[in-house]
Amino acid sequence: MTNDVATVRRAVGPIIADVVVPPSKSIANRALICAALADGESEIRGLAPGDDTKAMIDCLGALGVPVGVSEVEGRLVGAVIGTGGAFPTGPVTLNTRLAGTTSRFITAVASLGPGPYVIDGDAPLRARPMGPLHDSLHSLGARLEPGETWGHLPVTVSGPVGGADAIMMPGDVSSQYVTALMLIAPMIRDGLRLGLSTELVSRPYIEITKSVMSAFGADDVDIAHRHVHVSEGSYFSTTYDVEADASSASYPLAAAAIVGGAVSVKGLGRSSLQGDATFCDLLEQMGCLVTVGPDSTVVMRRRDTPLHGIDVDMADVSDLVPTMAVVATQATSPTRITGVGFIRGKESDRLGDLAAELGKLGADITVDDDGLTIVPTDLLHGARLDTHHDHRLAMAFGLLGLVVDGIEIAEPGVVSKSWPGYWDALDELPSRLT
């Protein structure tokens, strides 16, 4: 791999591998916020190593919440000195880089302090929508001043929020907006009563938020069909262990499905908090054998057992659409993915950009209103694929290099957002042969 392009060695036999993936950045970032809002010192064991986590730690530090990071037995451990939600008077600039999760969580957290706090990020993040969150914080009494366009970064936030009888937000745009409000809700007078004007997408991520909040003492949280209620309260300091990242695990597990063989991911077992852990169930539907134990997940496929396509609503596991689309190119029948129209507003247009890049390889892929249809073809060929600043596209595209010659992935360094060592891990897989 160079800074400009990555290539992947084709696998010439079945893959047999035990793979260690990073800790969950989704869980780690929620835990960092809860620890920051608690009184006293918390220890978070298993910080994700990517850029998103670093951006969160730097932003918390700028808000007066020191986070010391050390390595213990191969894991990154964060020592967080919580301030109970008390932040210094600004001006303070909070640079969230390319981290959508961090930008949304930190914007909500900033509304608890006096401000002014300027939340900004790199150019691709400035293009991503933030309107429903900004509208909601305004309804709660925060002052928001857009740097250019309402609902986008940069934005200057001043608080503190004062509470409201009830606020409304669409549920089908991003679960990160809902999570951002949930995380600060215990610190708001009378808590939070949030109504959802549309169906909630990615509900498993909301359940993760509830679980992490409960671990830090904020356990009066009710998630219903069209509303979320969080009582006023407080967080307490604690020690929190972060499990392996199910989204990252999808790539090596998908490699077993694509190439054949068996891949085991440690630290991701049957008690996982993450909805993305159910990706292995989809691979099972496609013809793989799956074993989920207390602390590991194994996906197996005999090379003489073909994959077959499925019809699947991926609204609750939308981050894995690129992975599923790549697996679907190797099946023997079409795959239809539905329920994910909202992912056009992720790091990239994860429908249009994904389809356009796979089309360069000769893939037969159609963008629908709410998803994709992938029709397998034997005519895939090499090409250079653009990542569109999206780590999920880059990692999914890399998998195709295991089975198609001549694939190059441009700007491979984008994977540092969540799994800096991804290309090394992928490069090892073809060498582990029976």
Image (tube, rainbow, N blue to C red):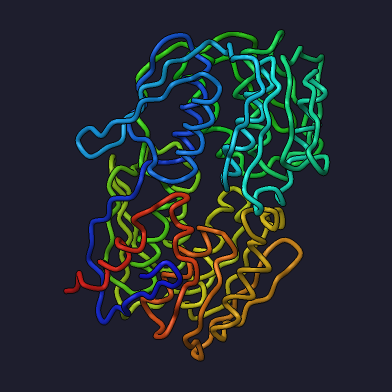
Task: Classify the position of the N terminus by image quarter.
Answer: bottom left
Location of residue 94 (image quadrant): top right
In this picture, is 153 found above or below 281? above
In this picture, is 349 found above or below 25? below
Coordinates of residue 63 in the picture (x, y in percent)? 56, 22
Location of residue 197 (image quadrant): top right
Q: Nearer the viewer, residue 22 or 371?
A: 22
Task: Classify the position of the C terminus by image quarter.
Answer: bottom left
Location of residue 76 (image quadrant): top left
Residue occupying the far left of the picture: 434
Coordinates of residue 228 in the picture (x, y in percent)? 69, 25
Report the residue at 53% width, 64% height from top: 393
Q: As drawn, is 39 to the left or to the right of 43?
A: right
Q: Nearer the viewer, residue 389 or 281?
A: 389
Q: As drawn, is 386 to the left or to the right of 302?
A: right
Q: Nearer the viewer, residue 208 or 40?
A: 40
Residue occupying the far front of the picture: 91
Q: How many marks?
A: 0
Report the residue at 44% width, 20% height from top: 215
Q: Nearer the viewer, residue 131 or 86?
A: 86
Coordinates of residue 103 in the picture (x, y in percent)? 62, 37
Report the residue at 69% width, 14% height from top: 114
